[in-house]
Structure formats: C-alpha cells, structure tokens
Amino acid sequence: MARLLAGVALLGTALSGCSAGAAMREPGHPPSARSSSTAGRAEPASPAPTPVGGATAAPAWLGTRVLPSRPAGSAPADTPPELRNRSIVTVDELPPPPDGRFHATVQAVPASVLARSSWAENCPVAAAELRYVTVGFRGFDGLAHTGELLVNARAADDMVTVFHRLFDAGFPIERMRISSAAQLNAPSTGDGNTTEAFACRPVRGSKAWSQHAYGLAVDVNPFQNPYRKGTVVLPELAGAYLDRHEVRPGMALPGGPAVRAFGAVGWGWGGDYRSLNDYMHFSATGG
C-alpha cells in the first residue's frame, strides 16, 4: 500500500503491525457473506480541525531507507526527529470530496482493485465475500480526503459507520490505501503509516490466518499506534509513540474517538491485550 512524496517503498511497511506478519496472531473464522448493494452517502460538512503543531510534508527519505538487519532482542530503533510528532500532509491518491463532506460507497470488488490487492485463490475468504469500500477521512492537514478499504461483506456497513464517526470527530488519518502482496512483502523501512484492513497473510510462525485475511480487522495509523511485544516494535521507527501518556494527534487511546467508534460496532481493540500492545489493531473478534 505509488506515493508522490514517499515513493513506492513506503507501501511495503503499510501494515507494519499485526497485519504485516510480525504482529499477526489470532486465527479467524470463515465469514458468512451477506449481500451489500452499492451505496453512496453524503453528510453535512464537519468543521476541519487544526492539527497540533501544524501538518508538514513528508521528509524526502520517507519510505526509501531500508532498515538494516538488527539482532533479535535488541532495543527498538530510534525514531527520527521528523517523525516524533508525526503530522504529515495527505497526498491525495483518490479524488477528495469536492464539498468537504463525508462520503462513502460500498460495492462488490472491481476486478482491477482485486488485482492490485493481496487477495489470491488460496486466501481464506472468497473474493465475492469481500467489499470495496471508500470513505472520507480527515487528514492531519484538517482537509477531507478519500480512502479505500477491502473488508468482509458482513462488516462493510459497520466500517462506513466507524469512519463516519471518526470524520465527524476530526480524528486525523494520514493514508488509507489497499496494498498488494508485493508491497506488503517489500523490505521494511519502518516508517509506514497506511490505515488498512484486508491483508492475505497467516499469523507469523503459524498456519492460522490473521483476522486481516478475512477482512475483519483494521489497522489505524500504525505509526502513531505501534505494536509492541518485548523488544519488538512495529513499525520499527515508531518507538517514540510507545509513550501513550504523551498524547499526539492520530493516537488510539482508551475512551478516545477511535476506540469508541470501533467499540460502538462491537469491535475489540489491540490496546487492551494483556501479553502485548497492538494499538493500531481493531477486529471483529477482538483477536
């Protein structure tokens, strides 16, 4: 999950947490698809928030510097100064809403979208059980943008509800795109920050599928909401965001907009796990 400012390599770290392998843990269960017709929605405009500290363009090196190999158990990599309070301006990869309002569509996955996703015949969910969803989101620049998700058909309407709530709350999201298998497996730069749902991957070190492989999990702002288990931090450069007491825009926090929005549709949060922290991760099963 090409980016004009950061380059294609950024896509390889788009799901740097649970859905990109290292943080994928729990198997899911094959969903029972239900029909979901194409829908378009427009809502009254919400006031654009003013990002704390102001939004900035991505540094020129973002997504291009492949991380060197590090010994297992070593301390997390340092977060570059430019990313310690990450508020990067969104580069529009889909046409933004011209009226600045929330819009959403739900439809069967077009062949062209499926072809650039990580879906394959051996995935645990049929293509017909997925939906292509576009939703409005607020960037760290305070502007309205358009994002895309592949989600399970039974969760599509709920995801529209969730992202509508986040839009109205002014919760900022940097990027929301679909990644291919090649992009997910690209060498890690440790600085990816794509909000994404479907990723056809098993749990690392296991034959069990992740909830992302069913389209029943979403990772939100992975850089602001990293995964941590012991000394492992993903994205690797996001260690500055392990301090959850230093509240910055885009963070998922107990009682905050993201946790409330997903909780309202019955989805659990990885920030509540006991054996690890997966702050980016929301799923239908809570696993």
Image (cartoon, helix red, strand yellow):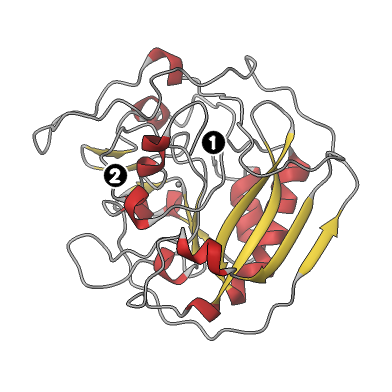
Residue drawn at x 36%, y 17% is 80
For residue 55, which numbered disc appears in the image?
A: none
**Furthest residue toward front:** 112
Residue drawn at x 56%, y 25% is 88
Query: Where's the C terminus, which quadrant?
Result: bottom left
Tag 2: residue type? Ala
Tell me, yes or no, if residue 213 can be seen here: yes
Residue 53 on image: x %, y %:
62, 14
Find the distance from the CA under tag 2 to the CA under tag 1: 26 Å
**Furthest residue toward left:** 71
Q: Is residue 276 above or below residue 48?
A: below
For residue 251, which numbered disc appears in the image?
A: 1
**Element on which disc 2 rests:** loop
Q: Are marks 2 and 1 in contact (CB under 8 Å)?
A: no
Residue 145 on image: x %, y %:
70, 40
Q: Closer to the N terminus: mark 2 or mark 1?
A: 2
Q: Is residue 274 left or right of residue 256?
A: left
Residue 84 on image: x %, y %:
44, 19
Residue drawn at x 67%, y 66% is 158
**Furthest residue toward right:** 44
**Mark 2 closeness class: few <14, some 14–19, many ≥20 residues within 10 Å:** some
Of residues 256 and 44, the one nearer the viewer is 44
For label 2, the residue is 186
Q: Is residue 37 left or right of residue 270?
A: right
Q: Is residue 51 left or right of residue 32?
A: right
Of residues 234 and 153, the one nearer the viewer is 153
Tell me, yes or no, if residue 287 can be seen here: no
